[in-house]
Amino acid sequence: MEIKFNSILREEMSIYDIQKALEQGEVTSKELIMYYLHRIAMYDQDGPKINSMLEINPEALFIAEALDEERKTRGARGALHGIPIVLKDSIETKDFMHTSAGTIALENYVAKEEAFLVKKLREAGAIILGKANMTELANAMSSTMWAGYSARGGQTLNPYGDPTLFVGGSSTGSAVAVAANFSVLAIGTETDASILSPAIQNSVVGIKPTVGLISRSGIIPFTYTQDTAGPFARTVTDAAILLGTLAGVDKEDSATYKCERRSHEDYTSFLDSKGLKGARVGIYHRASNEYYDSGEYDEVLFKQAIEAMKEQGAIIVDDIDIPSFHRDWKKGVMLYELKHSLDNFLMGLPAHFQVHSMKELILFNQQRKVQSLKYGQDKLEMRESLANTLRNPEYIHAKLEDIYFSQDQGIDYALKKYDLDAIVFPSYIGSTISAKAGYPTIAVPAGYMESGRPFGITFASTAFSEAKLIKLAYSFEQATKLRKAPQWR
């Protein structure tokens, strides 16, 4: 016998849509969670088998019922009260779910404390619906591993068109869960392109914030310098709501100290449909030939996006130059910091775990080759012999050069030279220079290629410019309204 859901529930409801229905008593959070669980069962784990979800929170329905009762007796806590959200599988939760970063070695790891951002979500009344699949160890396993694959979760598929379509990495499951309407919101993490890439590939909004705007404590680390969590949503409005909840100082993460007077509790105040009017926007056309030949670029769609910004009153500064964009970025930071941070995380695992170092993780995988090493582990093996101290001159020089060439001779240089509010890139080609700088970028949908493959653009700027970027991205989104839901076959 088929389950019949409340007729008000439909695909692609926004946070405001849902809150209005909840306030008017037209639907409950319990019904909402049941609706999304049904979609996960029908389309993620069956049917087209998108495979974006790694675990479901067994307490989600109970939490929803409690929040429904709280709404009746004391009112809603805010915009996220009773709203489901999915977390990347590297974000720790203190509940019955595991945190494994997609590895079989950690498939039974249950955290004793939860991430600072998870605490903030719970305080805001959000419902953690489950954990999303991800590229295993945030793409630190193998140079041949397909994005969106993990030994524990298998391969996540792109919900648009051809199932072999690139899904982006490594926060793949988080982006896909939102794109396919398995959740209202999701959180991913980025070291370089791990939020921006899947956002573009799956036609959703993704915000990679300034490093330090959102606490990293309670998240399995891969670098100290570049790691940050960030929101996925189907609209800029929903992403802005989530960003305001996540931002703030955490005494356990020194990177957040600098954001005390530079973050906002409510980024929705910057949602201005006329936000592009008078804004000076630099357009970057100087990507590598490899990118232009990759199939990710669509010249017509990019030109249409630029024209749309012009029509909204933006002052377009075309074909800007960023001097350091094509420099040979050294691997030192990601090479050494991943070894150091991952080793330290593994060292802190409970005594009964078989893995307490990268060396032991490599051995564990070798002993379970069939399950664990479909793509090998050459990236892990390459780092295994490195010292677990961050004093190597190659590392120190790389760290200093990354900061100097991405900030002083990179993003900040271009913003000052051309007197810009933001830089717009096709797709996510600016992810590396922004990641090295620790600067924010917002990805927004910008149409679909003839093949059905999503295309998007990214707005980037200097440190703690999220408010300005949200203003510009929202204005572009409202003027174009290009995003379409995936069509199930």
Image: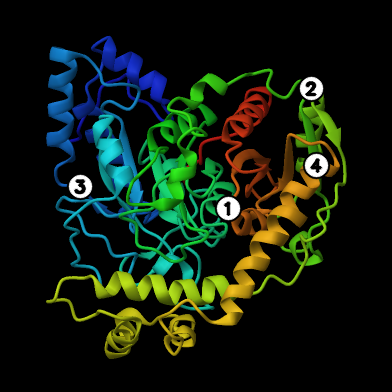
Numbered circles on residues, count: 4
Mark earlier in primary sequence (2, 4): 2
Mark 2 residue crowding within 10 angstroms, few (<14) / some (14–19) / many (20+): some
Question: In terms of sequence position, does the residue under pointer 4 or pointer 3 come before the other?
Answer: 3
Q: Which mark is residue 278?
A: 2
Q: Residue at x 78, y 49 (%)?
A: 413
Rounded to the nearest whole Å, what is the CA distance between mark 2 and mark 1? 27 Å
Q: How far, Cα to Cα, is label 2 from label 4?
A: 17 Å
Query: Mark 4: few, some, or many residues within 10 Å (few <14, many ≥20)?
Result: few
Q: Which residue is mark 1?
A: 438
* 84 to 401, vertically: above or below: above
With respect to residue 266, does 348 lie above or below?
A: below
Determine the secondary structure under disc 3: loop
Where does residue 120 sit, x and y in percent of width and height? 30, 37
User: Which of labels 1 and 3 is toward the front?
Assistant: 1
Residue in view at x 58 percent, y 34 percent: 483
Judging by the rendered image, the residue that carries numbered circle 4 is 416
Spatial separation of the CA atoms under disc 4 and disc 3: 47 Å
Q: Amino acid at mark 2?
A: Gly
